Amino acid sequence: MGVVMYYPVSLALQPTRADSNWPFAYLLLGVAVLLAGVSYPLRIRFSASADGRKIAAQVRTAYIVAYVICEAAAVLGLIVLFASGWPLYWVFFLIGLAGLALQFPRQSEFE
């Protein structure tokens, strides 16, 4: 839900200076893609117990960790916007939203 709110906030709080050649924008974009990509394997790793059984509390914790990592990818977009005014800051929001969509909970994981 937070990713959806970042876009209206970014429209309301547009920075005054814009630097479309900010060198760290692409670096942070790569970090955002890495965060969204690593959230799925981390969720799988945190949800499994040592003996292979899935405990509901562990599964919930794994989902929360994965959601926070995907939200961090979107927050990087706000950082890029306020630090440089990079015009493609919204791509970070899409990456975070795609990561969240991949993490959508399934009933079978809680059984």
Image (tube, rainbow, N blue to C red):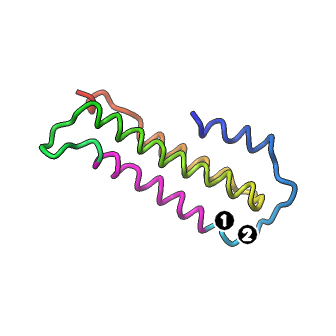
Q: Please state if 47 lies on the left or on the right of 81 as rendered.
A: left
Q: Which residues are magenta?
A: 27-45
- At x 35%, y 41%, the residue is 62
Residue designated by label 2: 22
Helix, strand or loop for disc 2: loop
Q: Quadrant of residue 26?
A: bottom right
Q: Position of residue 86 (x, y in %)?
A: 74, 60
Mark 2: which amino acid?
Trp
Hey, which quadrant is residue 71 in on the image? Answer: top right
Q: Nearer the viewer, residue 24 or 95?
A: 24
State how far apart marks 1 and 2 are (Cα): 6 Å
Q: Secondary structure at mark 1?
A: helix
Is 47 drawn above or below residue 18 in the view shown? above
In the image, residue 14 sits, relative to residue 84, either above or below, namely above
Task: Identify the mark at residue 54; answer none if there is no mark.
Answer: none
Report which residue position mark 1 lands on.
25
